[in-house]
């Protein structure tokens, strides 16, 4: 069967997931959203006579690993005790594992299930969103949970792409993207140098993906979702990552973090390098995906992501101005 990344769960997959996690009887599933790594579906079941909804996440790349999810769950539990609310991850009833594999239209996919959070996604323009986000970040940074020596994922602190070589590789398959990389070669090289020259600093356990789209306003208050990338990171670089992602609202967000007694400060370009690393690494990964013959269903998404990332590249001057505006 042809695989579309936005397909909802087939009936056989629904049945397998419901059985694995003890969710009762399946009623229906609906596609909610997709990202670079996977898709989210809303699964409705009847459990003990009541209709219940569940979040079902599908990995496009079978990247889920039990030890990493165990770490994530431990982290979310500690954050919840500090007032940062997160949905609970469900375990399989047979063995307590979080991940289940199902042979479906993709030829085999990993899935995990979490509590469904009913509500409205936050927007950075909503008056209440930024104080909630920055309050959460301040609490997580104040917790300062140890990483026990776990290294930072290079995704956040280093860039290994040779942008000229990547443009050459793309020339025959995606000439418009190759041209785009050549047009931005000077900025890409300068930004890569900035990131790779920045020394590593003290790290703590961080969410790493706090943003307005990962805040859900539920009837009981705000809930923070998408903890899968949580791990070691320099806290002030996580702060820089979030406030730069908010654009014109960055200053307001920084003030909200300070008002919430957040312990970190932005004072140098180095504090923005995780933001730059994520931006460029995402551009590079999506560009390389256009060379992947095994996943043609991902090419349209990848092309749109590269074009968007290239159009929003910062310059050293704009980053300097951003830091100066926070002082």
Image: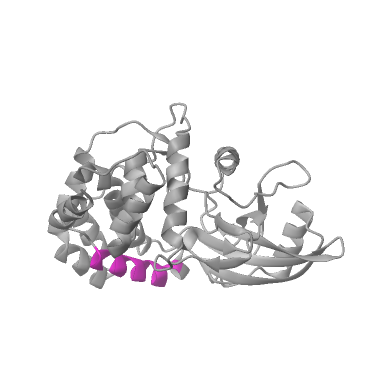
Range of residues picked out in magenta: 298-312
Counting the numbered discs, the total is 0
Q: Nearer the viewer, residue 50 or 46?
A: 50
Whether residue 146 appears in magenta in the rendering, the answer is no
Color encoding of the figure: one colour
Which corner quadrant holds the N terminus?
bottom right
Image spot of residue 175 (x, y percent): 24, 71
Residue found at the far right of this picture = 49
- Horizontal side of 187 relative to 279 (left or right) equals left
The answer to whether residue 61 is above or below residue 230 is below
Image spot of residue 57 (x, y percent): 60, 58
- Please name the residue shown 35% across and 71% down the image: 304
The answer to whether residue 30 is above or below residue 13 is below
The answer to whether residue 65 is above or below residue 12 is above
- Horizontal side of 16 relative to 249 (left or right) equals right
- Please name the residue shown 32% across and 43% down the image: 237
Q: Nearer the viewer, residue 80 or 91?
A: 80
Image spot of residue 206 (x, y percent): 44, 41
**Res 255 seen here:** yes
Q: Nearer the viewer, residue 301 or 252?
A: 252
- Please name the residue shown 58% across and 50% down the image: 85
Whether residue 304 appears in magenta in the rendering, the answer is yes
Q: Quadrant of residue 133?
A: bottom left
- Please name the residue shown 57% across and 38% down the image: 78
Image spot of residue 295 (x, y percent): 46, 64
Q: Quadrant of residue 73?
A: top right
User: Which SS type dominates the magenta stretch?
Assistant: helix
Residue found at the far top of this picture = 148
**Res 159 seen here:** no
Residue found at the far front of this picture = 259
């Amino acid at each position: 069967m042809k695989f579309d990344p936005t397909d909802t769960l087939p009936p056989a997959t629904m049945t397998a997931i419901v059985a694995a996690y003890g969710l009762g009887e399946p009623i229906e599933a609906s596609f909610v959203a997709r990202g670079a790594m996977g898709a989210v579906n809303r699964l409705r079941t009847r459990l003990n006579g009541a209709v219940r909804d569940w979040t079902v996440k599908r990995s496009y790349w079978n990247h889920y690993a039990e030890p990493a999810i165990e770490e994530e769950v431990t982290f979310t539990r500690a954050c919840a005790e500090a007032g940062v609310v997160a949905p609970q991850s469900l375990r399989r009833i047979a063995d307590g594992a979080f991940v289940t594999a199902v042979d479906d239209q993709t030829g085999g996919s990993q899935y995990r299930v979490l509590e469904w959070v009913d509500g409205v996604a936050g927007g950075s323009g909503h008056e209440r969103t930024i104080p909630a986000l920055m309050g959460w970040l301040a609490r997580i940074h104040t917790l300062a949970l140890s990483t026990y020596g776990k290294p930072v994922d290079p995704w956040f602190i280093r860039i290994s792409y040779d942008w000229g070589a990547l443009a050459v590789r793309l020339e025959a398959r995606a000439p418009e993207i190759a041209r785009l990389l050549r047009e931005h070669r000077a900025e890409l090289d300068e930004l890569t140098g900035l990131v790779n020259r920045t020394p590593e600093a003290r790290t703590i356990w961080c969410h790493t993906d706090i943003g307005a789209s990962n805040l859900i306003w539920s009837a009981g208050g705000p809930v923070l979702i998408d903890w899968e990338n949580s791990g070691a990171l320099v806290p002030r670089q996580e702060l820089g990552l979030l406030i730069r992602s908010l654009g014109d609202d960055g200053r307001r967000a920084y003030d909200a973090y300070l008002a919430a007694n957040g312990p970190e400060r932005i004072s140098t370009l180095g504090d923005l390098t995780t933001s730059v690393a994520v931006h460029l690494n995402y551009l590079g990964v999506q560009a390389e995906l256009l060379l992947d013959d095994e996943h043609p269903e991902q090419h349209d998404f990848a092309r749109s992501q590269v074009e968007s990332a290239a159009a929003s590249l910062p310059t050293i001057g704009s980053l300097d101005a951003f830091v100066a505006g926070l002082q």
